[in-house]
Image: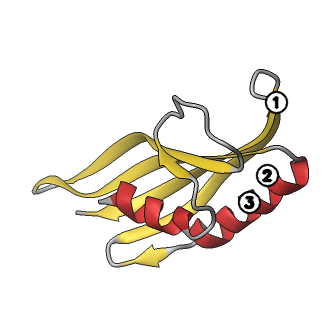
Amino acid sequence: MIDETIYNILKTVNANTYPGAIEQEINPPFISHRQLSMEPYPTKDGASTVDILDYQVGSFAETKAEVMTMAAAIRAALDEYSATGIKIRISDQKDSYDEESQLYVVIQNFRIRLKQ
């Protein structure tokens, strides 16, 4: 459910949006996204009713300006996003240059509070 929600939001930023690792040649710019971890919060009465997810979004582009613009649009779309049972906040952002692919990269991490 959350992967589909994130995918649909990111598609509004860039049509080239892919879940998980990028395994084939893709023309930039593009976005990849994946869940890194999930931490359940059990209640005194039993199973967790709220999970905290760590989610990562990567932006890839041929120029620094293009990747920074895309990262800003992703942050605007996801940071403080709230819907029924979902709350998203940015927790970290790093940018770099990948020598192998010759692409500029911005990695953003988000914390997602997900009600069951």
> In the image, what residue occupies the spot 51% across and 68% down?
9
Q: Position of residue 45 (x, y in %)?
A: 10, 57
Which kind of residue does numbered mark 3 sit on? Met
Q: Of helix, strand and loop, which one carries label 3?
A: helix
> On residue 47, which mark appears?
none
Q: Position of residue 23 (x, y in %)?
A: 51, 29
Q: Of helix, strand and loop, which one carries label 2?
A: helix
The residue where tag 3 is placed is 70
Q: Report, in whole angstroms, how far the alpha carbon at label 3 lies from the one at label 2.
A: 5 Å
Q: Position of residue 70 (x, y in %)?
A: 74, 60
Q: Are marks 3 and 2 in contact (CB under 8 Å)?
A: yes
The residue where tag 1 is placed is 102
Which kind of residue does numbered mark 2 sit on? Val
Viewer-proximal residue among 44 and 5: 5
The residue where tag 2 is placed is 67
Which kind of residue does numbered mark 1 sit on? Gln
Instruction: Please tell me whether residue 87 is drawn above or below residue 36 in the rendered image.
Output: below
Q: Are marks 1 and 2 in contact (CB under 8 Å)?
A: no
Q: Are marks 1 and 3 in contact (CB under 8 Å)?
A: no
> In the image, what residue occupies the spot 41% across and 39% down?
37
- Please identify, in this view, whether the residue under mark 1 or under mark 2 is nearer the observer: 1
- Please identify, in this view, whether the residue under mark 1 or under mark 3 is nearer the observer: 1
Q: Of helix, strand and loop, which one carries label 1?
A: loop
> In the image, what residue occupies the spot 73% across and 57% down?
71
For the C terminus, the image quarter is bottom left
Q: Residues within 10 Å of mark 3 (few under 14, many from 20)?
A: many
Instruction: Please tell me whether residue 28 is drawn above or below residue 82 in the rendered image.
Output: above
Q: Position of residue 35 (x, y in %)?
A: 43, 43
Viewer-proximal residue among 26 and 48: 26
Give the mark, 1 or 3, whose residue is nearer the N terminus.
Answer: 3
Viewer-proximal residue among 31 and 72: 31
Q: Residues within 10 Å of mark 1 (few under 14, many from 20)?
A: few
